[in-house]
Image: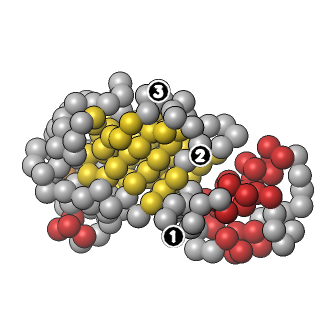
């Protein structure tokens, strides 16, 4: 597992997770092969344009699950109005309809922040999927500094949506990412 992780580069934990899932699905133990079949899906897309998983996004294709970690106020990018250092749609996460998506939000910023999946536009306040917001109560008040919250949802309709901070004013300042639901295929992460 360690060698597979090192071969995969700078995101060892997540790669290892997918490699393990793929190995279990394939029933194959040839982890040390030069061109293991576990990389088949990743190889189909140019890694510079689309890749899954990443440090922030892990996937189990066999279980149809995806997990996204959002650290609000991760660094000084966009004056702190960012998730994982991304704002203004710079991160694009894509999952097929029917996947169960877990979003974990941690507030490491200096202001309250929230995360919600909305429909329409990055300035929308309309939840795209029932329960797709953290904190689930008081999403506009936000999560206090240092706190964490998580939510799960299963998107059923393809489309382009947005992960936004619903603390008033934060969307307008660019605290949003893109969330795409596809009709099929595999999850991807772009930045
Ligand atoms: Cu915010």
Residue occupying image coordinates x 89% and y 52%: 28
Q: Which mark is residue 48?
A: 1
Residue at numbered disc 3? 156
Mark pair 2, 3: CA separation: 15 Å
Residue occupying the far left of the picture: 169
Instruction: Check contact, mark 2 vs mark 3: CB within 8 A.
Output: no
The mark that comes first in sequence, 2 or 3, is 3
Q: Is mark 3 within 8 Å of ligand 1?
A: no
Residue occupying image coordinates x 22% and y 46%: 122
> What secondary structure is marked by label 2?
loop
Residue occupying image coordinates x 81% and y 68%: 35
The mark that comes first in sequence, 2 or 1, is 1
Q: Is residue 100 above or below residue 104?
A: above
Label 3 crowding class (10 Å Cα cut-off): few <14, some 14-19, many 20+?
A: some
Please state if 190 lies on the left or on the right of 133 as rendered: right
Residue at numbered disc 2? 186
Residue 28 visible? The answer is yes
Residue occupying image coordinates x 56% and y 57%: 52
Figure label count: 3
């Amino acid at each position: 597992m360690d060698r597979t992780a090192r071969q995969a580069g700078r995101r060892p934990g997540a790669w290892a997770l997918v490699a393990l899932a793929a190995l279990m699905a394939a029933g194959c133990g040839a982890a040390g092969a030069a061109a293991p079949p576990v990389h088949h899906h990743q190889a189909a897309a140019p890694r510079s344009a689309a890749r899954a998983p990443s440090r922030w996004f892990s996937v189990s294709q066999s279980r149809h699950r995806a997990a996204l970690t959002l650290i609000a106020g991760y660094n000084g990018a966009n004056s702190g109005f960012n998730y994982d250092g991304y704002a203004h749609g710079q991160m694009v996460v894509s999952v097929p309809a029917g996947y169960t998506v877990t979003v974990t939000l941690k507030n490491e910023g200096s202001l309250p922040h929230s995360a919600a999946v909305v429909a329409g536009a990055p300035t929308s306040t309309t939840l795209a999927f029932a329960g797709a917001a953290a904190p689930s109560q008081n999403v506009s008040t936000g999560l206090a500094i240092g706190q964490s919250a998580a939510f799960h949802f299963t998107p059923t309709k393809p489309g382009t949506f947005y992960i936004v901070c619903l603390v008033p004013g934060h969307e307008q300042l660019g605290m949003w990412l893109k969330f795409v639901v596809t009709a099929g295929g595999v999850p991807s992460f772009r930045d």
